[in-house]
Image (tube, coloured by chain):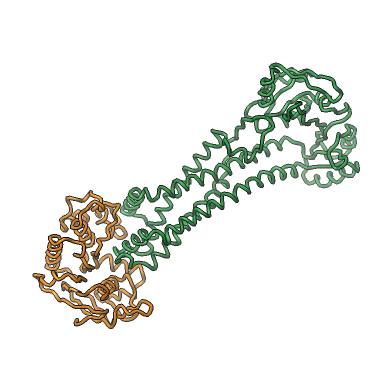
Amino acid sequence: MFSSSFWHFLTLQIFKERHKHLTTLLLSILLLFLLSSMLFIASSLRYVVMETLEGEPDFVITRIQGGDPASTPLEWMDPLFDIYGITQITPRVYGRYFVTPKEESFLIVGVDPLEEQSQKALKELLEGIDIKHFSQGDTMLVGQGVARYLKAHYYYDGYKFLTPTGEFISLKIASLLPVEGNLLSNDMVIMPLEVAQKILGYASNEVRDIGFNVPNPDERANIMDKVASLHYDLRIVSKTEMAQRYRDLYSYKEGIFLLLFIMLLVTFLLTLYQRYSMVYSSEKRQIGLLRAMGWSIADLLRLKFMETVVVVMFAFILGVILAYWFVFVWDAPLLRQIFLGSENLPNFVSFPPVVEFSTLGSIFLLYVLPSLAAVMIPVWRVAITDAKEAML
Amino acid sequence: MIEIEQLHKVYGERVILSDITLHIGCGEMVILQGISGSGKTTLLSLIAGLEKPSSGAILIDGEPIHKLPDRFASELRAAKIGMVFQHFNLMEHLSVAQNVMVPLIPYEPQIDRVQERVSSAMERANIVHRKDQLASRLSGGEKQRTAIARALVANPDILLCDEPTANLDHANALKFIEMMESLHQEGKTIVIATHDPRFNQLKVRHRTIPMVEGKLLHG
């Protein structure tokens, strides 16, 4: 189909007309870079969130007061033990601790380090940390953002937390949470459950919520109904719902970005289409000339198709590689704000490198195919009508 | 052999060619003479199969080029017809050799074979010494010789030339005429559309056919 002479001529055409292709190439690289970066960030965030949710319990129950979550009595755990099919019932304490007088806040998470579910949820974060020492009660693990904040305010070894009763609780920094988990742990402070209860103002028989697992998926709907009927002010949320909420959040941001991208892409493709259809009479003349030299319409289309494929594929590969480097090596400066929003504490996020074939496929479908069509349709229209252009 | 029978060409309501009947034998040289707008270029374009006639027939060695599907018409054009244009119509971004190879690309798969034929055509057109020069940097005469090399590279039987000396100085115009005489002596069928009176003094046997308002005055 493509002889050595055809390839020779094709490379000649591309190389010799490189100035003509350069604008298309640069614009293509820029658009593909933006699109790929956005899709890479979204995939990476989705991956992180889903990985985190993996360690979460299948269901979480909370007490609702006035439509808002309120502290949940620990005694709500008791009837759960009686329902067959429920395992790993875990009380959870967490909440925002606002550092007065500024707006910065820490996310306090109380854990029972010896409890299986907590260990599972914090597996990544607690890796390499001396749990025994941590569980003694006067120490805490802090995220990188918290550590920077404390240092900036001359708290080098620990911090004194003020409880709602006016009491100070002093905790020493046992260790920093690993930088790889910054996306979630930047503003996190992990401490023993009882200490967290005091700092966040929970009574000793109250927690934020209670998590539990239902290993048999067929039983989940049934058990959910049973648990929901235990208390009139109980709210139950499944892991599937939580996952969906996160997916929706990132899909929403991805959607807005995609909309902007499509507007840019359409403008670019219209320019490309116009260039090949009307504005560039030299293009028409070249097509007419090749026809006069004995080239058939199929030969012409093959040449123009391959010219475009080479330029677009080159842009595709380069745009994707640049985006990979920008997102996963440089951690997407500027662009990450679109997805992460304004940070509570300054963050240095690392996106785990996640490249899905479906993402690459989406980029291909969104860019390569429309670009080929934008060139080939006008070329085909000229090729079938204007062979006499060569005579002018 | 080119046979044109009762050819008409109309653009909208404007009649460009009317009732053209013309037979051009193998190895014959025909000069179509007429002022601009007399229909010479359109007639050449129809003979080459670049346009379809409104009515009538054009046969190249018995093949009705106007009726053939694009692929076969293109093959016929590539194999049997070489064209030389008034404005040379070279691809300015390519070198002389690269321009000359253009007609062979779809039909000669081996690049080595293409390069051999290109060298031979450039030698015939006396432009081989400028083979690596970009077309945009050639003089008018050199561009014309490149265009001739390109027209000859597939060794066609028929050469169609549209106002070939219109953009040449006197010396180069005479060289071109000499080259056409030489090709005619080699047995090529040559049709030249021109209003250049220098073609009246051709040293070889030829037929001059005046064209006026889309009609041949005698054929």
Residue A287 quadrant: bottom left
Query: With respect to residue A72, does A293 lie above or below?
Result: below
Q: Nearer the viewer, residue A259 or A364?
A: A259
Q: Quadrant of residue A214?
A: top right
- Which quadrant of the view contains residue A186? top right
Does A95 sit above or below residue B195? above
Q: Residue A203's x, y, as percent?
A: 88, 27
Q: Is residue A301 left or right of residue A224?
A: left
Percent of width and height locating residue A312: 45, 50
**Is B75 left or right of A328, judged from the image as shown?**
left
As drawn, the residue found furthest toward the front would be: A101
The answer to whether residue A312 shows anywhere in this view is yes
Residue located 58% across and 49% down the image: A260
Apparent colour of chain B: orange
Mark count: 0
Residue at the (73%, 28%) spot, across then down: A102
Q: Is residue A358 above or below residue A125?
A: below
- Quarter containing the N terminus of chain A: bottom left
Residue B112 seen from this side: no
Spot occupied by residue A153 in the image (x, y as percentages of width and height): 69, 20
Residue lying at 43% horizontally and 52% vertically, measured from the top left: A309
Q: Give residue A274's position: percent from left, percent from top.
A: 45, 59
Q: Which chain is green?
A: A
The quadrant in which the C terminus of chain A is found is bottom left
